[in-house]
Image (cartoon, rainbow, N blue to C red):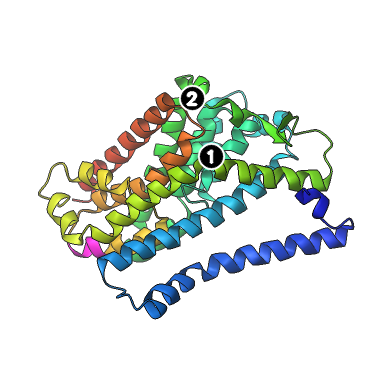
């Protein structure tokens, strides 16, 4: 029996069922960290400060967190996409001037609180709705890179000047990178299924007159389909991030990415890419490294690489982007982040 057939037939019943599902999702998300604290620290008696414990906790916590985020966002985006008019969406973010579309998409990304991994389903929805790939990539970069949490934390820790530089640099990277990739004509390197909306395994017109139950069914099928394709790759990416998180000491950063090393920014970006975190999660490490004397430009480049080029995100993107486009994405965004790091070190020296 499909999910559509299990839904109550009345509007009130359907609303109650969806509210209960949303409440269960929220409860699972907010109790995720506490659950692993209880199981590992209290039940198993593991030392919270031990490297092995940090590695195991990171892996378990982030696996569940990312799975929940992907499930919720893929479902919501797919249901919303079923109402979207391809022509209207293309006109809103595409338009006749792609550069304006890049600016609009980057601005939308700033106010959209997605992490790098959870922005991927939104990327699929944008492309399926006819938004140009370069414009969509501007959103994909800006959404995790420049968000209200990062802005608030940087402002409270480092002041308005650094915050203004961070916002301007992040938006510039997102706009220029998206526009550059769009000019390269990279549409041919997007996997074909991204452009399709399916129901019951069959491609459909997203503007067709679907029932509410069919839209819910389409969202559930999209969640199952995407997670089934990506879960092995996602576990590998989170596992690598967990190992680095637990075993890379802070002294490693100060030794190889300090102000005395001309390649410090490059080292910081190379270290940041395998990690996975959002801006709030990475900020305590950034503050600790700042207290140890790391240059601000190096720290911002490190943070940008973590939130905009994380390994789990790249693994997810590989399911929708072919290797040439994925390589171009990493090269263009990485070059922008490195450039921002050296520029900030020069301006804030």
Left/right placement of residue 20 relative to residue 107 reads: right
Q: Residue at x 27, y 44 (%)?
A: 269
Q: Secondary structure at mark 2?
A: helix
Q: Position of residue 105 (x, y in %)?
A: 55, 38
Position of residue 292 measured from the top left corner of the image (x, y, whole percent): 18, 63
Which label was assigned to residue 3? none
Q: Main secondary structure of the magenta part?
A: helix
Q: Which mark is residue 229?
A: 1
- Percent coordinates x, y for residue 243 in the rendering: 29, 55
User: Quick check: is 155 in the magenta stretch?
Assistant: no
Q: Residue furthest left?
A: 260
Residue at the image point whose x is 62% and y is 38% from the top: 125
Q: Which residues are magenta?
A: 288-292
Q: Quadrant of residue 87?
A: top right
Residue drawn at the location 73% of the way across and 63% of the way down:
19
User: Dot 1, how many residues are within 10 Å of its Cα: few (below 14), some (14-19), or many (20+)?
Assistant: few
**Residue at the (53%, 32%) spot, across then down:** 135
Residue 126, image quadrant:
top right
Which mark, residue 182?
A: 2
């Amino acid at each position: 029996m499909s999910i559509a057939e299990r839904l109550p037939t009345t509007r009130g019943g359907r609303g109650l069922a969806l509210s209960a599902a949303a409440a269960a999702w929220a409860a699972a998300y907010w109790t995720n960290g506490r659950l692993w604290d209880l199981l590992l620290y209290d039940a198993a008696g593991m030392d919270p400060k031990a490297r092995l414990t940090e590695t195991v906790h990171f892996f378990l916590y982030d696996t569940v967190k990312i799975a929940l985020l992907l499930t919720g966002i893929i479902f919501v985006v797919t249901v919303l996409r079923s109402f979207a008019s391809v022509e209207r969406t293309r006109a809103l973010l595409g338009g006749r001037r792609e550069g304006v579309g890049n600016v609009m998409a980057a601005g939308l990304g700033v106010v959209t609180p997605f992490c790098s991994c959870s922005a991927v389903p939104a990327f699929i929805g944008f492309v399926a709705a006819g938004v140009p790939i370069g414009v969509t990539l501007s959103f994909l970069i800006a959404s995790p890179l420049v968000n209200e949490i990062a802005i608030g934390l940087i402002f409270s820790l480092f002041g308005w000047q650094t915050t203004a530089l961070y916002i301007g640099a992040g938006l510039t990277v997102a706009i220029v990178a998206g526009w550059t990739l769009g000019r390269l004509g990279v549409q041919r390197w997007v996997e074909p299924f991204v452009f399709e909306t399916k129901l019951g395994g069959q491609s459909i017109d997203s503007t067709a007159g679907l029932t509410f139950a069919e839209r819910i069914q389409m969202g559930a099928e999209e969640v199952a389909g995407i997670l089934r394709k990506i879960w092995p790759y996602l576990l590998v990416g989170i596992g690598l991030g967990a190992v680095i998180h637990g075993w890379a000491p802070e002294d490693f950063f100060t030794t190889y990415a300090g102000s005395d090393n001309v390649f410090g920014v490059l080292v910081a970006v190379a270290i940041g890419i395998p990690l996975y975190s959002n801006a709030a999660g990475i900020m305590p490490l950034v503050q600790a490294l700042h207290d140890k004397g790391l240059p601000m430009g190096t720290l911002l480049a490190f943070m940008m690489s973590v939130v905009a080029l994380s390994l789990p995100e790249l693994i997810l993107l590989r399911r929708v982007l072919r290797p040439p486009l994925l390589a171009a994405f990493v090269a263009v965004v990485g070059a922008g982040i490195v450039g921002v790091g050296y520029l900030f070190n020069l301006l804030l020296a």
